[in-house]
Image: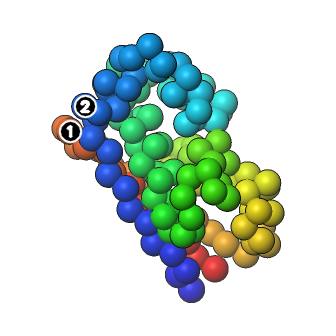
Amino acid sequence: MIVGIGLDVVELARMDRLLAGPGSRKFVDRVLTSRESEGWGSLQPRRALEYISGRFAAKEAVVKAIGCGIGTLVGFKDIEVLPDKWGKPVCSLSVASIERLGWAEESYRIHIAITHERSLAAATAIIEK
């Protein structure tokens, strides 16, 4: 049964300005988990912009599907989006956030899709119980 749907869109130009500013490393460290950051650090500039924009949009879409905002019960680092062996984005929540939400760890499944276009990145999240 679907219990939540979330969608988020990010302007790549806005994200590019954030990454070009003096607080860019702090922003990246706030948004990406250490494993996500490993994947981001080795990318060419355009692909790195798409990567972090897509992860940002995915995390926003997930909290919208949950029904809370970022930081309320779930923070950026509580949500991890990594590729499976075929490159499909797979989302997982930290144990701490699952406990804060009062979820049984295996009772919910999060499906996400991320897309990029010349000027935008977008993500959809569907939570299934």
Residue 108 position, x and y percent, is: 67, 72
- Classify mark 1: helix, strand or loop: loop
Instruction: Pick whichever, 87 or 49, lies toward us.
Output: 49
Q: Residue at x 29, y 33 (%)?
A: 14
Name above or below for residue 23 compared with residue 35.
above
The quarter of the image holding the N terminus is bottom right
Instruction: Pick whichever, 54 or 87, lies toward us.
Output: 54
Q: Residue at x 76, y 62 (%)?
A: 100
Residue that badge 2 annotates: 13
Q: Residue at x 54, y 69 (%)?
A: 67
* Farthest-out residue, front: 72
The answer to whether any part of residue 125 appears in the image is: no
Q: Earlier in the sequence, mark 2 or mark 1?
A: 2
Q: Residue at x 79, y 55 (%)?
A: 95
- The mark total stands at 2
* Farthest-out residue, left: 118
Is 29 positioned to the left or the right of 57 in the image? right
Residue 41 position, x and y percent, is: 52, 20
Quadrant in which residue 69 is drawn: bottom right
Q: Around disc 1, counting alpha carbons within 10 Å, would you say few (fewer than 14), some (14 to 19), or many (20 or more)?
A: few
Name above or below for residue 7 compared with residue 3.
above
Is 118 positioned to the left or the right of 9 in the image? left
Mark 2 or 1, closer to the camera: 2
Residue contact between numbered discs 2 and 1, judged by CB atoms under 8 Å? yes
User: In the drawing, what numbered circle is on residue 83?
Assistant: none
Residue that badge 1 annotates: 119
Residue 17 position, x and y percent, is: 31, 24
Q: Around disc 2, counting alpha carbons within 10 Å, would you say few (fewer than 14), some (14 to 19), or many (20 or more)?
A: some
The quarter of the image holding the C terminus is bottom right
Residue 5 position, x and y percent, is: 45, 72
